[in-house]
Amino acid sequence: MTPGTDCEPAVIPTRSITPKNIDVDALKVVRRLQRFGHSAYLVGGCVRDLLLRRVPKDFDLATSARPNEVRKLFRNCRLIGRRFRLAHIHFSGKVIETATFRAPLDERQDGDLLIRSDNVFGTEEEDARRRDFTINALFYDPVQRVLIDYVSGLEDLVERTVRFIGHAGVRVREDPVRILRAVKFAARLGFEIDPAAWRAMVRYRRDLTKCARPRILEEIYRMLRGGGAEASFHLMWEAGVLGIILPEVAGYLSRAPERGEERDPGSGLWAYLRVLDGQDRELLTNAVLVAAVMIHTVTEESFGKGRQKKQRSRETAAEAAQSILRAMVGRINLPKWEAERIQQLIASQRRLFNLRQDAPLPKGLIRRAYFPEALDLFEIGVRATGRGSRTLNRLRQAFRRPPRSLSPKKPARQRKKR
């Protein structure tokens, strides 16, 4: 069906979503918008997660109200964005993101479908059809307690399928970051990727180089924090996407047979990602997450098999990390200060893993500002490899004790004047 044509949506009463599952402030925003004559719904990931009995990370809204109209109704509203104008309604400790219904853009004649601006407002049906995946295009009216489905999103949710809305090739070329989003959702939810979507992702994967680099980096962080890091990297490796955004990691995986890892290529990397998926990732910094991905590539470059002995002794892990991370700074906009921190973390791991049980603890390293992060990365390595647990316990105990230099000094006893 051509976007913009009238179509009766599937309106599905549901009692599986109750008001207690919905953020109270999001509910307030919906009710106020509707009270002033606007359509307003919960939309996107929060609806999907509520139907899957998952706890939504945040609650996004879609409305017929224009951004300026939303701002007039809420004193705590701020408008943001140029490419995509949004209303952020601020409450204590959180933001309710509210977007006006958008219309699909006219097809460009030069063959370049990349979206550079998206502020053409439209109807709720147009808004549903211009979204990326069917499972993310469901509207939910929490006042009437009904689902509104224009794109058979509920059916794909039941079938556990990630499917693009409309022509998959067009949707990917409009915004190639959707390739990473498809990977993220499939991995996090345990869904299958629709075959047409997979073919488009593989065919247009090189279009990722056209995208804003911070957006790619942000999607990588979300994959690592979302609980599906191992599955995400497997999918990116299979689709050839990893070779575009992280070619160093792709090269490491491609050399698996040389390391004797035919059965489980890149077993070290997968083990680290598996540990990430099984622990509280919110407490880990971005530097620790990226270091967990890059440490095996760096180790192979500096100390791996196939390197000349003289070169191995000359090149340290820090130097190898610096060389690799310098390329990442330019390719995915990794901040320089973060790249330096990642380099420090990776360089510290060899020292920690080689620490003998009876050896004194490295007090100089413990005093470093980055040591808490180095310890987090070391703990991931201990869980992944099954070795170094005693050293980890010693380091944890030593780190909890304040260094002697920081302990309060006793005041000097003054001489009594005679």
Image (cartoon, rainbow, N blue to C red):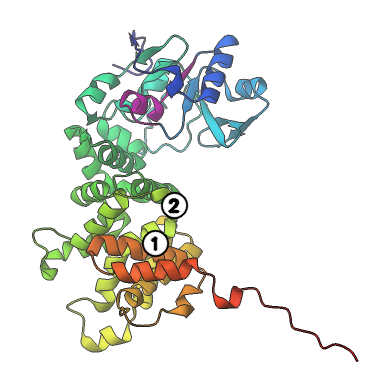
Question: Where the N terminus falls, by quadrant?
Answer: top left
Look at the picture and state if 322 lies above or below 150. Answer: below
Q: Secondary structure at mark 2?
A: helix
Q: Quadrant of residue 137?
A: top left
Between 417 and 398, the one nearer to me in the picture: 417
Q: Which mark is residue 376?
A: 1
- Report the side of 16 relative to 411 (left or right): left
Q: Answer whether labels 1 and 2 touch (C-beta < 8 Å).
A: yes
**Furthest residue toward bottom:** 418
Estimate the x, y position of residue 236 in percent, counting from the top left.
Answer: 24, 49
First in sequence: mark 1 vs mark 2: 2
Number of labels in the image equals 2
**Type of amino acid at the residue the image marks with label 1:** Asp
Say whether residue 48 is magenta: yes
Q: Quadrant of residue 312?
A: bottom left
- The residue sitting at 36% across, 63% down in the picture is 377
Which residues are the magenta region?
A: 40-55
Estimate the x, y position of residue 330 in percent, counting from the top left.
Answer: 42, 61
Q: Which residue is mark 2?
A: 283
Between 206 and 32, the one nearer to me in the picture: 32
**Type of amino acid at the residue the image marks with label 2:** Leu
Q: Secondary structure at mark 1?
A: helix
- The residue sitting at 31% across, 66% down in the picture is 295
